[in-house]
Amino acid sequence: MSTAPDLNETIERLTRENAQLSGLVLATGVLLTQLLQSNLKRELNPWKSATKMLDEARTAIEGFKPETAGEQNPAMKERALEALAQYDEQIKAVLPQ
C-alpha cells in the first residue's frame, strides 16, 4: 500500500509530466499551424484547400477506434475534434477567401 509521501511524490511527478507534455503539445500545435498556413497560401484556392484538409481530418478523427484507448476514447475524440476546430480558426485566419 502506498504511503502519503509516495502518493504526494507521484502526484508531483505526474503534474510535472503533464506540464511538460502540455508544453510539447503547444509547441507542436504552433509549428503545425504555421506550416499549414505557409503551405496553404501557395494553393490557388487556399480557403477551399484548407476546408477540404480539415474536413478529411475530421472524418479521420471521427472514425478513429484505438484499441488501447478503452474508456478514454470518447474524451480523446472530443478533445481532438475541439483541437481541429481551433486549428480551423487559426489556419484560416490568415488565408484569403
Image (cartoon, rainbow, N blue to C red):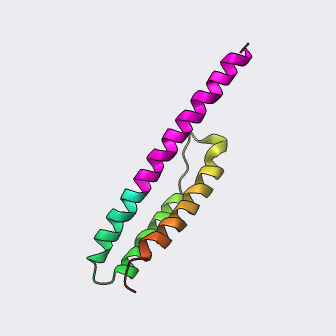
> Which secondary structure is most common in the magenta stretch?
helix
> Residue 32 location, x and y as percent?
38, 59
| Left or right of 75, for residue 28 | left
Q: Specify whether residue 31 is painted magenta.
A: no
Task: Say which residue appears at 53% left-offset and 34% top-offset.
Answer: 17
Task: Say which residue appears at 59% left-offset and 50% top-offset.
Answer: 76
| Above or below: residue 5 compared with residue 90 | above
| Left or right of 35, for residue 2 | right
- Looking at this view, is 50 or 17 the one in front? 17
Q: Specify whether residue 15 is painted magenta.
A: yes
Is the C terminus in the top left, top right, bottom left or bottom right quadrant? Answer: bottom left
> Residue 88 location, x and y as percent?
48, 70
| Above or below: residue 85 compared with residue 18 | below
Count up the numbered dots. Answer: 0
- Specify the segment rendered in magenta: 2-29
The residue furthest bottom is 97
